[in-house]
Amino acid sequence: MTTPTPQTASASAPAPTPSNTMTLQVGECRFVTRPATLTRGSDFFARQLSGRWPDIQPDGSYFIDADGDVFQHVLRYLRHEIMPIFYDNVKGHDYALYLAVLEQARYFGVEPLQKWLEEQKYLQAVKIVHSARVLDGIEDVCGPTGSHVKIEHHVTWKSRKVYVCRRAITGHMGNRDACGRLCRNARGDADDEYEDEEVLKILEVRKTTMLDAKMRVEQR
């Protein structure tokens, strides 16, 4: 990661007017923007564009010795005033990128962005909700779900006692109340009969990722 360094006045040119576009050469990356976009939220650019830019290139672009891949996130904030979220459902937050953007936010004097990153507000903007439920069969597993939901299934077999009808009537199996007088007569004085049955149980664990969009604009 390249740390921005102050420029020397080896060459200079009049700063562009707010209505014009200007090209920034940030490291190996080029960006076209307006001076007003840069100056309204950056102390660095407000100073640089108040007089003569010290390091203009032969093609008319303005050079900044910084990491352009990181600067694009700073410029995106200056354009839209939306705080960045670098989150992946598998990898989680990209803390290295947060730190790199924080370093440039400090250098370029973008105070709201700096504060957001220093206070790790992105941890509050992304919320993770876990839930679990027990399913009685594979048919309960099916169904659509959103891409923000990660589901895990843990399968096990459990043994349960199932009522046995003495007359072996299929509709009575497992339901003692279904047996009438004839079934009770067939049982006589014997105790109710039960047998062990293996049943499938599925523990479904859901991880739901939610983004609080209001958090991203709270500093505006």
Image (cartoon, rainbow, N blue to C red):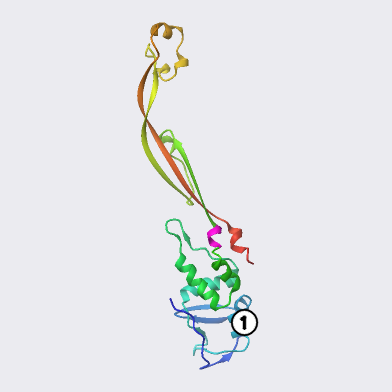
Tell me the residue at 54%/62% (across/down).
122
Q: Position of residue 176 (x, y in %)?
A: 44, 16
Q: Position of residue 108 (x, y in %)?
A: 56, 78
Q: Which residues are magenta?
A: 121-125
Residue to which mark 1 is pinned = 46
Is residue 43 toward the left or the right of residue 56 in the image? right
Is residue 131 toward the left or the right of residue 156 in the image? right
Is residue 157 toward the left or the right of residue 124 in the image? left
Q: Position of residue 27 (x, y in %)?
A: 46, 80
- Of the residues shown, which amino acid type is indicated by label 1? Ala
Between 34 and 166, the residue placed more toward the observer is 166
Tell me the residue at 46%/73% (across/down).
69
Between 182 and 131, the residue placed more toward the observer is 131
* Quadrant that contains the N terminus: bottom left
Between 28 and 41, the residue placed more toward the observer is 41
Tell me the residue at 64%/76% (across/down).
40
Queried whether the magenta region covers residue 124, the answer comes back as yes
